[in-house]
Each structure stands twice: as C-alpha cells, then as structure tokens.
Image (cartoon, rainbow, N blue to C red):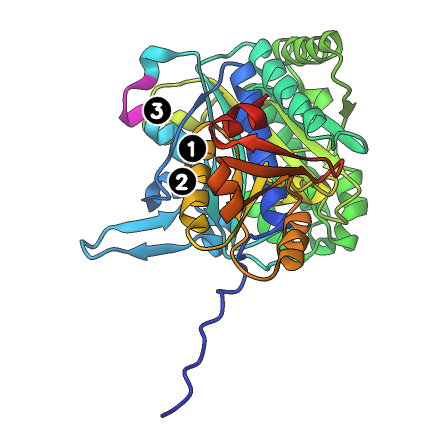
Amino acid sequence: MAKIQTPQPVRGTQDIFGEEQERFHHVVETFERVRRLYGFKGVEMPVFEPTAVFARSLGETTDVVSKEMYSFEDRGGDSLTLRPEFTAGICRAFLSNGWQQHVPLKLSAHGPLFRYERPQKGRYRQFHQLDAEIIGAGEAAADVELLCFADQLLNELGIADGVTLQLNTLGDAESRDAWRDALVEHFQAHKAELSQDSQDRLERNPLRILDSKERQDRPIADAAPDIDAYLSNEAKEFFAQVTEGLDACGVAWTRNSRLVRGLDYYRHTAFEFVTDRLGAQGTVLAGGRYDGLMESLGGPATPAVGWAAGIERLGMLLEEPKAAGPDAIFIPLGDGCEASAMKLIGELRRAGVSCDMAYKGNMKKRMQKANAAGAAHVIIIGENELANGVAAVKNLATGDQREIVLSGLVEALTA
C-alpha cells in the first residue's frame, strides 16, 4: 500500500499556535476593550460577498480586483468573492439592512481576509485585520475620534514607541479633481521615464504614482505638485479642524503631503501609522475618509471614515507575552483519587478558577510538569487526604504547603 502523503498548508496561510496565538489574542482582546470605551458596536460580516461589492468599491482597475481577489462561481452561477477588506462589506450591510436610521453609526469588526499576493513578513494570503468605521458623520470630529481610538489602541498594546502618525488631506471633490488634473499633466510630461507600472497607473489611477517604490519613479514623483496649491477654502478648514482636534487630544502627527488614496471616493483625511521596525513594509494601521463609497454601491451620498490594522503585524511588534499558567494543577495519587479530583476540578472551574490535572508519571515528574506550566498551586489528593476530607495545597511561588478541607478549596483559591 502506498504511503499516504500528508497534506501541507496552502501557501500564504498559517496555523497560529503557542506564543503567536497569545500575541494574536492579546491584540484582539485589547481592540475589543478599547472599542467599547469609544462606543463602537461590534459587527460580524460574511466571509464572502457578491463580487460586485468589491469590484465597484475598490475599482475594476485596482491591483486588488484585477490580480489579488479570490473569486469563484458558485453552483447557482453567481460570482462570489472572499472578502479582501472589511469596508465594502460593511457599507453593503449598512445599505441592505437599512442601518441609515442609526447614523451616526460607529462599527468595529475583526477577522480573516483573503488576497492572492506574494507572502512576505507579516503578510499572508489569509490574513486578519481589525477594522473601525464611523458612518454618517461628515464632521472633522469623526476623523479625530477615529484617530484617537487608533492612537489609544497602539498605546495600550505598548507598541506606540517608534510609530508615527502620517497625515494628509485629499481635499474635497473639487480640490481632488484639480490636483488630479495637475498630476496627470506632470506625469504625462515624463511618461517615457516612468516604470511600466506607473505608466499603466497614469491611465487609470495616477495618484498611486506618488507612492511608487520604483527607483526610477521617485525623482518624478517627488517633483510632482502638492495638493495644497489646489485646496478649496472649505477643504483647508476641514483639515485644520482635524489637526487642531488631534493637537487638543495630545495625538502626535506629522504631515506627509505624498500620502494618497487612489480611488475617487476618498476625500479629505488620509492617514497611516508607520513604524521602522517591520522593514520596508512599515504601515501597521491606515485609513481615511471615503465620502463617495456608498454611492458607488447604489446608496445615497453618506459621509464615512474608517481604518484597518493587520493583527499579525501588530502582534509582531508586541513584547514577548507572559504566558498565564493555571491557578492550580491537581495531582491525584491512588485508587479512586482521580475521580474525586475531577469532581473538584469541575467545582473550581465553575467558580472561575483555572485548573488542570497531571495524570501521568511519578510525583517528581508531575511536579516538574506543574512548574513548567506556570501553575500557581499544586493540589495533591491521595488516599489519606481523601479519608481525612482534605487536600495538600502547595504554593509553587513560596514553597509553602498546607492542608485545606475539600469544601474550602474554592474559597482558599479565590480569596
């Protein structure tokens, strides 16, 4: 009989375990705690959507839609796509469920996303993100609140040092259109000198040339006109309100006039939290205002602003997590002791005490296992202890050992 070949994981996916899982859980747990402080409601989205949700919202000509989406036809002949990001699906849900009645609506989500891109440090084909959106608020105060949320999250994760908030304005529709025309004119004059990717973008997404990583593009991109010369008075005032709000809240920021979002529905604020601790791919959290997105999905004009952050990338910046051991590990010794230990473990767990059992090995090996697990206490139950209605409880930090009546174990370990 031929040897069965063990299946291997799909390239760009990961099995999260041990320390990596502790980091992952800590990021999500912190996000959930902080989002409640800001009054964001959690939302769970389908992992797949009609392909049109992303094709319309991300733009047919973007790399995500043309090269990276996992799309497939289901048995009914409908084109479906595994979600490559959260925002479009949340906007679809907002429109299809009639959530307009709740505006301004503050929503948060986290979970897996899917993109067929080259796997690299902190980037996977199935990856995970945190997401926060404020829908139905056109005021600069919404942008400030979202940025404060992001800043507090990074601080509470303990990774804010070395992370810089880069901020820009894309102006209102009038400002953006005027700037776009000036950029096209500038890049058109240097088209032959641009990389092939940038030449392609000149036709379909010229703003993206500004953040090109190709060496030959940088002198041309750096010489391109800034948006400031094209900002309307209203756009200038909006950006001033954002920066003044951040200053008032003590959120440090730096201006990056080359920070862009390529799609036409983005307006006003664009931002990235950037670190130098992850190599060239240094963005850990990014977002912006997308006042035109709802219209691209067939809805009414609805202002909105949001951000997303990679859970894996945030986890990589964390200090090594301290593994939390159980409150107690039971060591049963002798006939009938294991069943009694299981009964006591059930009582302790229902009382909120984390505990486990060391089943195998001699006393020395079981004690070694308890120490290795980081347990706070060892509870020894032998035939003599059962006969006397007590357990020997040893504090592994101090080495102190005492006998406690079985009915008082819960109280002793929760005191």
Q: Nearer the viewer, mark 2 or mark 3?
A: 2
Residue 363 screen position, x and y as percent: 63, 56
Front in this rendered view, residue 239 or 327:
327
* Amino acid type at image mark 3: Phe
Residue 295 located left or right of residue 210: left
* Amino acid type at image mark 1: Glu
- In which image quadrant can residue 92 be found? top left
As drawn, the residue found furthest toward the left would be: 76
Residue 150 located left or right of residue 128: right
Cα–Cα gap, marks 1 and 3: 45 Å
In terms of secondary structure, what is the magenta stretch mainly? Answer: helix
Picture layout, residue 266 above or below residue 382? above
* Quarter placement of the N terminus: bottom left
Residue 157 screen position, x and y as percent: 68, 30
Please give the range of residues in magenta. Answer: 95-99
Residue 223 located left or right of residue 114: right
Residue under label 2: 343
* Mark 1 vs 3: CB contact within 8 A: no
Q: Which mark is residue 94?
A: 3
Residue under label 1: 347
Element carrying mark 1: helix
Does residue 97 belong to the magenta stretch?
Answer: yes
Element carrying mark 2: helix
* Mark 2 vs 1: CB contact within 8 A: yes
Residue 258 screen position, x and y as percent: 73, 33
Q: Residues within 10 Å of mark 3 (few under 14, many from 20)?
A: some
